[in-house]
Image: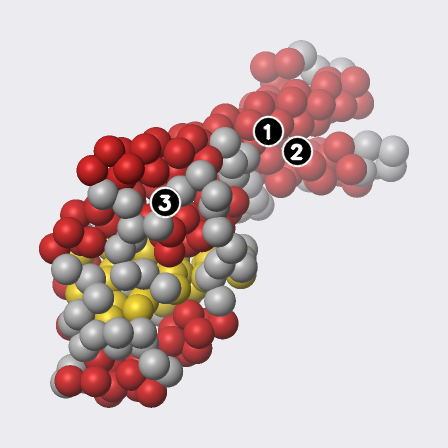
Amino acid sequence: MPKRFVVAASEFSELPRCATGFELADSLMVAAQQLHETSSPHSILRTAVRLAVRILPGAEHAGISVIEHEAHRQTLAWTDEVVRSADALTAGREQHPYWSRLWTAPVARIEDSASADGDGELALSGLGLRSVLSLRLRADRRRLTVLTAYARRPRAFDESATRIGRLFTAHVSIALDSATMREQLTEAMRTRDLIGQAAGILMERLDIDASEAFDRLVRTSQRENTKLRDLARRIVDASEGDQGGRAIRGE
């Protein structure tokens, strides 16, 4: 299950609020640097919502959520509790036209929740959230990742705010892709070392060569419907006893 983060909407002293022109370019450059300096996808999400309320004109609150087809919407990062309250009010409405349009369009916007037709939008006005701007960060056939900004005044997000939002989310998406790749490469290195350890244990215990040890790991993984890294971890953890050896010899 993805981790969740709540962050204070504290200010970034380097970023002028609602910048335009050269100030906007400078703000996006600083934001990109801060996003790429983070160490993991989860920390990027946390940084992104914090930056969003500084960069997007009119934004007062922000959150990032994942929407799955015929499943649910889960908020992963938020600036404050009103964002969680807003998500709780619209829970179970993932097929609502507002969210559904993000599968085919990069942006969705509510001008004034007090005059919107849906119950979810009217409920938002009860929280004092009148304007909503949602920007797609990632999309595949099963899942959307969306950054949503909220404002307490109606029609807070005009075309300019939307364009700035799309520039900002492009930076967030690139940073997410980069951090995800780094995380996957790190995990691959750890997995390789772990599988090598497990193979070494089998070579010693069963008096077989490296190729046969790896083949046995693969066959056992398939037979038990277990990921190779999980099987390797089990063997390494049990190396002081004989559980790992028994698991492999049980073919």
- At which x and y percent is residue 9? 49, 58
Observer-nearest of 203 and 51 = 51
- At which x and y percent is residue 5? 53, 57
Q: Residue at point 30% right, 69% down?
A: 151
Task: Count residues near mark 2 (Cα–Cα under 10 Å), then give few for <14, some for 14-19, many for 20+.
Answer: many
Q: Which amino acid is tagged 1? A: Thr
Q: Are marks 1 and 2 in contact (CB under 8 Å)?
A: yes
Q: Residue at point 70% right, 27% down?
A: 198
Choose the circle earlier in sequence order: 3 or 1. Answer: 3
Q: Which residue is mark 2?
A: 232
Horizontal side, residue 87 vs residue 155: left or right:
right
Q: CA distance from mark 3 to mark 1?
A: 44 Å
| Element class at badge 3 | loop
Residue 143 visible within the image: no
Choose the circle earlier in sequence order: 1 or 2. Answer: 1
Task: Count residues near mark 3 (Cα–Cα under 10 Å), then give few for <14, some for 14-19, many for 20+.
Answer: some
Q: Which amino acid is tagged 3? A: Pro
Q: Which residue is mark 1?
A: 191
Q: CA distance from mark 3 to mark 2?
A: 51 Å
As drawn, the label of residue 16 is 3
| Element class at badge 1 | helix
Observer-nearest of 201 and 138 = 138
- At which x and y percent is residue 191? 59, 29
Q: Residue at point 25% right, 86% down?
A: 122
